[in-house]
Image (tube, rainbow, N blue to C red):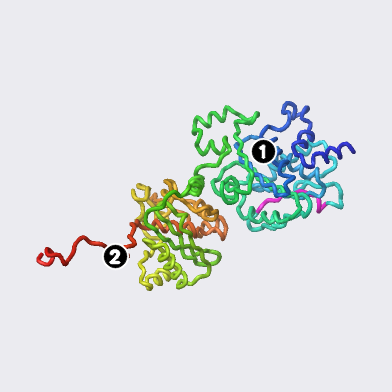
Amino acid sequence: MTSYVDWLASCTDSPLRFVQGAFPWDSGPLAGFHGPEPWQAEVLADIERGLPTNEAIRLAVASGHGVGKSALVSWIILWAFTTLPDTRGVITANTETQLKTKTWAELGRWFNRFIGRENYILTATALLSKDPTRERTWRIDQVPWSEKNTESFAGLHNQGKRLILIMDEASAIHDMIWEVSEGALTDANTQIIWLAFGNPTRGIGRFHDCFSPIGHGLFWHTRQIDSRTVSFTNKKIFEQWIEAYGEDSDFVRIRVRGVFPRVGEMEFIAAYDVDQAMLREVEYSQGPIALGCDVARYGPNESVIALRRGRDARSIPWEFYRGLSTVELASKVVEASNHYNADGIFIDGGGVGGGVVDNVRSLAYHCWDVQFGGIDDVGGAATGNSGEVYANKRAAMWGAMRAWIRTGGILPNDPELRKQLIGPMYGLDTKGRIQLERKEDMMRRLGSDSSPDRADGLALTFAYPLSVVPAEVGGCVEWEYNPFTEDALHG
């Protein structure tokens, strides 16, 4: 028993050493496998490198099918739990069925192969120490998530010890669970390990954000595993898929290459396009300055003043407000228009926004009253979306904005804007016209704090075409005709 305890102690900071010695690799069903696959060993080494840093380990792994992800999750659970007393943790997955029949079932298989299993208890919902005095302090639980019941994730704390959170098939876990789980990162002097695994099925959401070069992605270490690099996968079926769908098709990207789709199912604006627009450098800004104002209606929503000069929506700072009256917001719009010499003001005139339109006009400023439910009068060659037919004005503005993003548009480096741009889904109405998901439906699907106010503010800048009004003209129109010439007087 002493030698077993000494060996466990030697593995406290080395999950790879643990996996190599914890299972009978040279006999039974494991004969011929010779330990972890190279990619699995690399992930275990990533964890080992992060342990001495005293910073939370945040590691996300996206993979194709059949690479041994569930086995790796099981090894990490057993290592984390057995090598440091009073470790606590939570394991969750995209669905309760996945959690119970796949993730936890795989843990059961590896627990039965583990050389030290007699010292621990694995139940249908928890991994426990046999020490009855540590039933509450030394355990890892499998917890199905629910956006209506986040307490299990809000209470993730284990001050001064080890805390582990694993999300399996993380692409489909609600953003709210990710956000609540971040509270665990506040414990000081605690070994925190947060791991997310999954197939990259969705081009939106927090799992996808882990792989982004901006926002949340700045804090995550990531790996993407191609199924063809794993020794025991079915290479023949992958070749068939590639021949049928193409190497760069979303089908192959998700199921073989372990990379995210360029466009998710019914996703109107691709995350890839938004990321490219946020990474572009501003070389020279020219063109008319459009000011779009999306008016907040209730609760946590923002009133947004978005400014765009031609291809550049980054150089001129945007403005965000909460709780302003229509008179106050109208004043902010006029101030921004004067300061930046806007060539056109476009205001969401629906509902309470009509008051902002009226107040701007009462100050003797011209603005467009944009009705989101109005007809599609936006599309065409000027906006780069010829042939696209939209069900209403809002969808048409988003279509013009999408074309602008794809063809060189420069976006602010704003994670909230990114989330809003890639959030809405779309469909077709009974006449075959493109119809964007309503704000209310998007908020119901993604959470009450997901209203696309910033994205709508930018979309408003595409409501109507603009031309630059020269500053020296002062907003007037120049005519070549002079009524005081000799010809005019005797005309």
Under mark 1, the amino acid is Lys
Q: In which quadrant is the C terminus drawn?
A: bottom left
Query: In the image, what residue occupies the spot 35% across and 67% down?
Result: 366
- Compare marks 1 and 2 and give the one earlier in the sequence: 1
Q: From mark 1 to mark 2, how far is it between C-alphas?
A: 67 Å
Q: Is residue 142 magenta?
A: yes
**How dense is the environment of label 2, judged by Cα within 10 Å: few (below 14), some, or many (20 and up)?**
few
Q: Are marks 1 and 2 in contact (CB under 8 Å)?
A: no
**How dense is the environment of label 1, judged by Cα within 10 Å: few (below 14), some, or many (20 and up)?**
many
| Residue 290: assigned label | none
Task: List x then y, in percent, for residue 127.
Answer: 78, 46
> Eyeballing the image, is 366 above or below 171?
below
Query: In the image, what residue occupies the spot 64% across and 48% down?
Result: 95
Task: List x then y, in percent, for residue 405.
Answer: 44, 49
| Residue 69: assigned label | 1
Mark 1 vs mark 2: in front: 2
Looking at the image, residue 368 sits to the left or right of residue 413; the answer is left
The outermost residue toward the right is 2
Q: What kind of secondary structure does the magenta stretch mostly adopt?
A: loop
Query: In the image, what residue occupies the spot 70% across and 51% down?
Result: 143
Q: Give the residue pinned by disc 2.
A: 476
Q: The residue tagged with tag 2: helix, strand or loop?
A: loop
Q: Nearer the viewer, residue 373 or 361?
A: 361
Q: Is residue 370 visible to us here? A: no
Task: List x then y, in percent, for residue 261.
Answer: 52, 42
> Eyeballing the image, is 342 above or below 81?
below
Under mark 2, the amino acid is Cys
Q: Which residues are magenta?
A: 135-145
Q: The residue tagged with tag 1: helix, strand or loop?
A: helix
